[in-house]
Amino acid sequence: MLTRKQIELLEFIYVRLERDGVPPSFDEMKEALDLRSKSGIHRLVTALEERGFIERMAHRARAMAVVKLPESLERKLKAKGAEAAAEAKPEPAPAFTPRVITGDRPMARPPRGAMPIESGFSIELPVMGRIAAGVPIEAIQQISHHVTVPSTMLAGTGEHYALEVKGDSMIEAGINDGDIVVIREQSGAENGDIVVALVEDHEATLKRFRRKGNMIALEAANPAYETRMFPDHLVKVQGKLVGLIRSY
């Protein structure tokens, strides 16, 4: 049997996981259970783990899953009207229609200088490697080659760069595996923007950005992929999508 404090902690962890998608910190657990030190929380967590109610993942900060609940706690949660139900689905963001340049993309650096393209000029951008439109991959910061884009594609001022898309999680936003996306460097984003997000300082991904309180949702544009939730301090916006180049 579990003690009263063990049940209280298990309920708190379960509700937070259901609501936010991530477990609470040890400081939050300590405050919720009105304990004086985190050592008491460590003992409670260890006891729950030893009894098979929770599981902790090695080598990942705050990675914890609820494996099972005692029957009494399950009945309590149901009686309270599913306090741990997921948040209401947000209103869909306006559909993004990428500006697509068809044809082969240049794999070698073009000659120096601007080249006329319709009424504007072309600009050479560095391709900084591959970006995951699926499960995040390790961030790549080395220039693999250069690509030429029309200056009219570059939105506003600021630095721009390009990335090759890997994966299919953004296909309903018109972004396919193998496309080249044009990114404007910026550190902020509005809800609904498609951004390059750096997760936990080592994984980069291309997703739709949405802030929910102190949490950041990185949403896919493919129903086969789940929305991933992170505390806002674990997500850094590296840039916003402004254009796309496709090779057929």
Image (cartoon, rainbow, N blue to C red):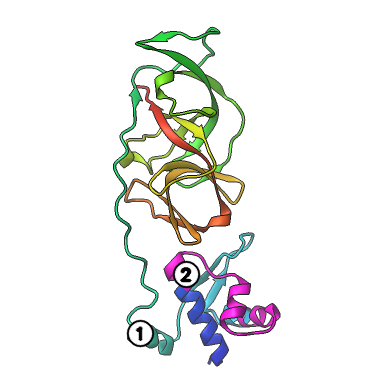
Asked which secondary structure carries label 2, the reply is helix
- Main SS, magenta residues: helix
Residue 30 magenta-drawn?
yes
Residue at the spot x=43%, y=69% of the render?
Answer: 19
Along the line of sight, which residue is nearer the eye, 105 or 154?
154
**Membership of 180 in magenta stretch:** no
**136 left or right of 95?**
right
**Residue type (three-letter) at the residue carrying disc 2:** Leu
Q: Which region is colored magenta?
A: 16-45
Identify the mark at residue 17; answer none if there is no mark. 2
Rendered view: 76 above or below 179: below
Task: Pick whichever of labels 2 and 1 is earlier in the sequence.
Answer: 2
Residue 82 in the image, given as x and y percentages of width and height: 35, 78
Amino acid type shown at disc 1: Lys
Residue drawn at (38%, 51%) of the image: 225
Estimate the x, y position of residue 66 in percent, counting from the top left: 49, 74
- In this orientation, which residue lies closer to the viewer: 134 or 13? 13
